[in-house]
Image: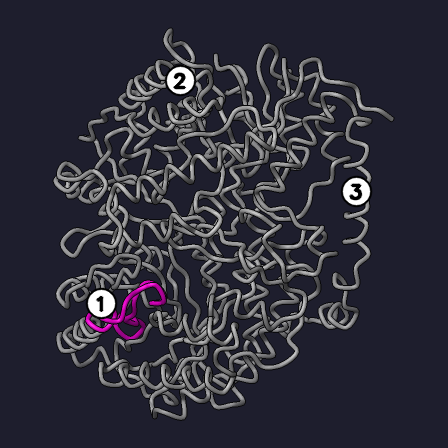
């Protein structure tokens, strides 16, 4: 059957696009600037070239209006803080002296000034810089970046659509500035902020922008009546401006719910909605609200967060239903394509049959254009594309890779007892103290040590055949010896081997498990200049052979102190991969957990007494709606316990989490039944320690005292001050001393100095403790 043509020709567009360039040119230019090898003019020219290339590629593919302003040197929320003048007082002098250096100081800090707090962007692995606001915050408009990029696109012959973080989402993402009462609500500043947005919109209109996109993803979360009222008030004000471009309010990552009615009634010119992660939710809600008469609907029917090809027939059915609900329907991805790699055609090492199942940003753009063409002209106009799409979907569904009967049988045989330790924590902790003999406030690190140029060169030489496997392994052994020697001299109590053999905490394991595919060029921005290559979880998971035992036991042979075995937990293995979309996540998590259980048991059998199973993504993967939390947390915590539940009582199980709002999941942290948890706490000033105490968390915890995402070296006094704050919430008998996160991204000089200061701080605080604390 031929689909009914649209009343108006559907246009293709995207919310945003990857920033890094085909070969991560932006990362290299920014890091070169930080090191003094690239000057500001060269950095800006690299950025301009990348923007030009992106817009040209989008236009040539058939995208009508290209996003501008979504490009960032570090983070788009930080860019918004600059746009509205919300620069913390401690950074004002740096920003006034040099805007670019001041910008990076807010992001990374300096030796003398702490950076902004960093946390996860909704339920993604992208990190944003948290705005710091207070009752004395004065907003001032600075639209220079947004206006300049709009003008750039116009000059090149494109139709720009500037993209801004919406005012309500911006305030809902903010936190009280240091020194401001914790109960201060940034949303109370909305009436102060709206005139600044009005000024920016007027500037963009004057620069030639016909449309501006205002992103309001905060409304796919549960929101109070007051917050919904704030949205209504904000868009009455902005929509009622006389001098403004047309306004497209965009949401993504789920169902808008009650906010859809609020925004549909607002005097704005269009809405952009996610029709992938919301299921039928947004479609049903839009119909119930009476649609968008007289307005533009941008329909996100191509998944912007995963890498599987689109089902054209399913998407066209959704689009056809939407035709009667808006004045015009345009086609887009469900969110910014920032969250997927750039180009699947660059992957030369993936089986060609499997490669046909993958769509990165370029391929998703092509899918959007095909769907817009089919919506406009009917399915006959895209008959060849539909036939190829059907064949590719069938190829994936029938592939042997996707189903392993042995894995499925083992998963089906799991019992509740498999996910429980043999003794309760109180009995285990006594056995562990006797076995490990650690002091009060034991010191450790999270796992990784600096990945030096020499290590990366050794891996490249191995891949290129310039050195053989034996030569590579000698280089790894040298690095482990150096890392162990430093830790012993520095006085750390529980050591790590430093992970020199690992490229990434997920990819390393994915490359050794069946069912995973690794990419060579699938880079995705995590924060700033930090990019990761999420592996592709394509089929059933099993562990053919031990993955970490050899290097952990080698490290333990070099020291009498305990060396932690280091693994990545099942939830994080899913969250930082592109997951399969053909079975429930909980089923996949159990498969990964069983593979890790084999590794945990082999580590213990080899003599490893401390095993850390990292789950930094536990909070990140929490669904955005509270009604869905319980089901997720049930399988997420179960999978962790399944991975770790088979060890002896005197084997100490650690876990680690970082850069998230932990207060939302304290009960789940408790339910993991880990013996020790280490958490990010330095930028948030020990907030998590207070949250654990308020919950009555009964186990050991190490809230971090060293912010490893900043190049600054914390002094002994600074680390000791944080430890004292930690002791206000956690007794000395259960408090560990550690950095916030792994040290992979740091250099050796700052790592040495920071860890030496950390150990000195622990010793200083131990000396202050009363003897009965032991």
Mark on residue 750?
A: 1
Q: Give the range drawn in magenta.
A: 731-753
Q: Give the residue at the far front of this rendering.
A: 466
Q: Where is residue 468 in the image (x, y as percent from the top left)?
A: 51, 83
Q: Give the residue at the far top of this rendering.
A: 242
Measure the C-alpha gap from mark 2 to mark 1. Answer: 48 Å
Q: Which of marks 2 and 1 is nearer the N terminus?
A: 2
Q: Earlier in the sequence, mark 3 or mark 1?
A: 3
Name the residue nearer the viewer: 25 or 232: 25
- Majority secondary structure of magenta residues: loop
Residue 457: quarter of image: bottom left
Name the residue nearer the viewer: 67 or 78: 67
Residue pointed to by mark 2: 233
Element on which disc 3 rests: helix
Which-is-in-front pick, marks 3 and 2? 3
Residue pointed to by mark 3: 388
């Amino acid at each position: 059957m031929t689909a009914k043509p649209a009343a108006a020709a559907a246009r293709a567009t995207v919310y945003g696009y990857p920033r890094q360039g085909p070969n991560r040119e932006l990362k290299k230019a920014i890091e070169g600037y930080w090191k003094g090898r690239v000057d500001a003019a060269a950095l800006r020219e690299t950025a301009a070239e990348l923007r030009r290339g992106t817009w040209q590629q989008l236009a040539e593919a058939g995208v009508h209006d290209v996003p501008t302003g979504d490009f960032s040197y570090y983070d788009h929320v930080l860019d918004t803080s600059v746009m509205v003048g919300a620069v913390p007082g401690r950074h004002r002098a740096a920003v006034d002296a040099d805007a670019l250096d001041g910008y990076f100081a807010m992001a990374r800090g300096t030796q003398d000034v702490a950076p902004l707090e960093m946390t996860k962007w909704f339920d993604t692995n992208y990190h944003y810089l948290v705005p710091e606001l207070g009752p004395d915050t004065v907003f001032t408009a600075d639209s220079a970046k947004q206006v300049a990029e709009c003008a750039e696109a116009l000059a090149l012959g494109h139709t720009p659509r500037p993209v801004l973080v919406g005012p309500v989402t911006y305030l809902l993402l903010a936190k009280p500035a240091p020194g401001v009462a914790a109960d201060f609500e940034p949303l109370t500043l909305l009436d102060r902020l709206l005139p600044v947005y009005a000024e920016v919109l007027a500037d963009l209109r004057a620069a030639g922008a016909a449309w501006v996109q205002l992103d309001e993803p905060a409304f796919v979360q549960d929101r109070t009546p007051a917050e919904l009222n704030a949205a209504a008030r904000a868009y009455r004000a902005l929509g009622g401006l006389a001098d403004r471009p047309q306004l497209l309010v965009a949401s993504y990552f789920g169902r808008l719910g009650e906010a859809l009615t609020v925004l549909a009634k607002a005097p704005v010119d269009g809405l952009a909605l996610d029709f992938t992660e919301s299921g039928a939710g947004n479609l049903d809600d839009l119909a119930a609200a009476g649609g968008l008469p007289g307005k533009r609907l941008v329909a996100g029917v191509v998944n912007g967060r995963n890498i599987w090809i689109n089902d054209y027939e399913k998407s066209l059915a959704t689009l056809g239903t939407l035709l009667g609900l808006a004045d015009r329907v345009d086609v887009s991805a469900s969110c910014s394509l920032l969250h997927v790699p750039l180009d699947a055609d660059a992957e030369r090492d993936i089986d060609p049959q499997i490669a046909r199942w993958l769509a990165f940003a370029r391929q998703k753009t092509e899918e959007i254009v095909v769907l817009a063409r089919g919506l406009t002209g009917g399915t006959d106009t895209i008959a060849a594309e539909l036939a190829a799409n059907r064949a590719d979907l069938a190829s994936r569904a029938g592939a042997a890779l996707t189903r392993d009967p042995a894995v499925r049988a083992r998963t089906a045989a799991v019992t509740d007892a498999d996910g429980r330790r043999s003794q309760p924590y109180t009995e285990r902790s006594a056995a562990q103290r006797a076995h490990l003999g650690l002091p009060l406030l034991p010191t450790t690190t999270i796992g990784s040590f600096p990945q030096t140029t020499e290590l990366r060169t050794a891996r490249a030489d191995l891949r290129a055949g310039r050195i053989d496997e034996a030569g590579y392994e000698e280089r790894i052994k040298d690095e482990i010896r150096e890392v162990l020697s430093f830790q012993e001299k520095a006085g750390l109590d529980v050591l790590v081997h430093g992970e020199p053999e690992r490229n990434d905490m997920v990819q390393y394991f994915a490359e050794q498990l069946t069912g995973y595919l690794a990419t060579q060029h699938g880079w995705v921005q995590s924060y700033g200049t930090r990019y990761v290559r999420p592996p592709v979880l394509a089929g059933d998971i099993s562990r053919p052979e031990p993955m970490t035992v050899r290097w952990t036991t080698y490290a333990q042979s070099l020291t009498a102190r305990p060396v932690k075995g280091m693994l990545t937990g099942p939830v994080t293995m899913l969250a930082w991969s592109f997951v399969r979309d053909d079975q429930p996540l909980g089923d996949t998590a159990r498969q990964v957990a069983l593979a890790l259980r084999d590794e945990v048991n082999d580590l213990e059998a080899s003599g490893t007494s401390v095993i850390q199973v990292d789950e930094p993504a536990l909070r990140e993967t929490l669904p955005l709606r509270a009604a869905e939390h319980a089901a997720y947390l049930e399988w997420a915590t179960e999978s962790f316990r399944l991975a770790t539940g088979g060890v002896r009582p005197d084997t100490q199980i650690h876990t680690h989490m970082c850069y998230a709002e932990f207060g939302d999941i304290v009960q789940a942290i408790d339910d993991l039944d880990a013996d020790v948890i280490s958490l990010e706490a330095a930028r948030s000033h020990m907030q998590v320690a207070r949250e654990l105490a308020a919950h009555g968390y009964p186990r050991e915890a190490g809230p971090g005292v060293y912010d490893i995402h900043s190049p600054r070296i914390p002094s002994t006094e600074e680390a000791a001050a944080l430890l004292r704050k930690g002791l206000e919430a956690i007794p000395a008998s259960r408090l560990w001393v550690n950095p916030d996160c792994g040290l992979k991204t740091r250099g050796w000089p700052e790592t040495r100095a920071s860890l030496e200061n950390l150990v000195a701080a622990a010793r200083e605080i131990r000396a202050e403790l009363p003897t009965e604390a032991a």
